[in-house]
Amino acid sequence: MKIEKELTKEFKKEFLETHFYYEVTMFLNTFFKMYRYQLKADAKDFSNELLRVVFLETFMLHTRNLIEFFYYKNRNEQSSVTDFIEILKWRKLKSKKFKGLDVLYSRICSDISHLTYDRKPIDTTKSWDTDIFSHVFILIEIFLNEILLEIESDKLKVLLYNIGEYKKGVIIS
């Protein structure tokens, strides 16, 4: 399905304040829950195995969506960072592709595609490398800082502020 709508400034703002906002919010909230779980700070919240799996899978899903948005070319109906920032400018703005990103992306896709032969059982006790996910945080910050130069949005400004607060709380460098 090909996008029929013109990507006007108003359309972009609406998209970012709804769909992008949702993805980032879910990424932040599930990241924080999983991080705290790994530290055993909120172990009582994860006493139920089903709850642990739900948070892990939700986290992986939204991480995958953001990785696809920031790194992979627009596939017609999917949004891409280059719908909002010119591709050459984006290449200059973003850091180089994190060396573990392809492995992470592959692992996430395999883990959330339940009916594949390559899928391994989800181990909710296994830690995810938070350094890899700090890279996604940085990409979100770079993108929001750039897009807020073009689009006036209090909702996106609050989102950017919240990312900073999460980073302080989780201590992502």
Image (tube, grey):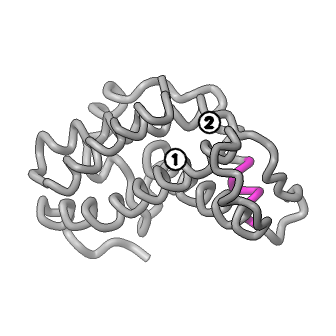
> What residue is shown at x 71% (from left), y 59% (from top)?
46
- Position above or below: 92 against 165: above
| Residue 112 in sight from this viewpoint | no
> What residue is shown at x 67% (from left), y 61% (from top)?
57
Circles 2 and 1, Cβ within 8 Å, touching? The answer is yes
Q: Main secondary structure of the magenta part?
A: helix
- Position above or below: 135 against 18: above
Name the amino acid type tagged 1: Ile
Name the amino acid type tagged 2: Leu
Secondary structure under tag 1 reads helix
Identify the residue position indicated by label 2 in the image. Answer: 101
Nearest the eye: 102 or 4: 102
Compute the Cα span from label 2 to label 1: 8 Å
Where does the magenta region start and end? 107-113
| Residue 64 in sight from this viewpoint | yes
Identify the residue position indicated by label 1 in the image. Answer: 67
